[in-house]
Image (cartoon, rainbow, N blue to C red):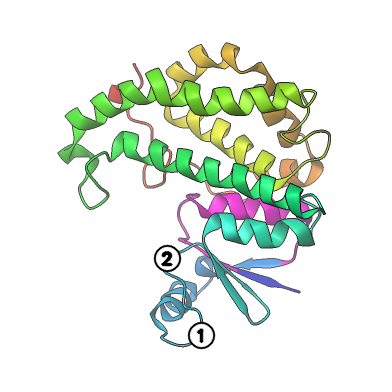
Amino acid sequence: MRYELYYWPSIQGRGEYVRLALEEAGADYADVARSERGMAAMMRMMETKNGTPPFAPPFLKAGKLVIGQTANILFYLGSRHGLAPKAEAGKLWVHQLQLTVADFVLEIHDTHHPLGPSLYYEDQRSPAKKRTGEFWKARVPKYLGYFEHLVQHNGGFYLTGRRLTYADLSLFQIVEGLRYAFPKRMRAFEPRIPGLIDLHDRVASRPNIKSYLSSDRRIAFNEDGIFRRYKALDL
């Protein structure tokens, strides 16, 4: 099957978690909106009233299925490409971890847009600075500390043990993104999460991921995505 991934063509965003899974799996897929007339095709699919129209990107077309929401897409791909356990309990556990990642991603976004996405960052600088301070004081230790404990408890390889899952790929992206958006803060925090840093490095060295990261399929971080670098927030 050739998958069709629909997401904004100039940012990593939430679509990147799906891209990483597809790349690790060696799946055949098209990043539709990055092709000619792809954006128009994506908008038509969201505007349709038939079937199961997605609310927003990312969404994945798999045969006749149209699947929306990052965690839902990964739940679908995981069992089909060896990126999730076979047993139901294991599948649900990895899905639960991915939903926790999704919660964290929202909090990361809100560091630079605490008053909402309809306003520019320049319109909410002061609240963003306050939100970022609280984020690094309380939220980062809570989330990354939780994932660090899981890695250490399972032998220091991956979240659920010795086998990679899509949740591990997502944590790789979290570390990459925080390093980009908050290089100073992240550099100071990393000694507290050695297991996650090792996990990040282990994922980065996997052949398919390594090839993807060096290709033009990997969109560079920029100030339009979830992870944004503002010097005033990285003190």
Question: In the image, what residue type sits under mark 2?
Answer: Ala
Residue 165 falls in which quadrant of the image?
Answer: top right
Q: Is 167 drawn above or below residue 136 in the view shown?
A: below
Q: Tell me the number on the disc at residue 56.
A: 2
Magenta region? 5-28
Between 137 and 177, the one lying in front of the other is 137
Sequence-first disc among 1 and 2: 1
Residue at x 72% of width, y 73% of height: 2
Disc 2 on helix, strand or loop?
loop
Cα–Cα span, label 1 and label 2: 15 Å
- Is residue 171 inside the magenta stretch? no
Q: Residue furthest bottom?
A: 50
- Is residue 17 inside the magenta stretch? yes
Q: Could you tell me if residue 214 is visible in this image?
A: no
The C terminus, quarter of image: top left
Question: In the image, what residue type sits under mark 1?
Answer: Gly
Q: Position of residue 1 (x, y in %)?
A: 76, 74
Q: Is 211 drawn above or below residue 78 in the view shown?
A: above
How packed mark 2 is, by other alpha carbons closer than 10 Å (few <14, some 14-19, many 20 or more), is: some
Residue at x 68% of width, y 66% of height: 29
Which residue bears the numbered disc 1? Answer: 51
Name the side, left or right, on which 33 lies relative to 60: left
Q: Position of residue 46 (x, y in %)?
A: 42, 76
Q: Position of residue 156 (x, y in %)?
A: 76, 23
Residue 65 falls in which quadrant of the image?
Answer: bottom right
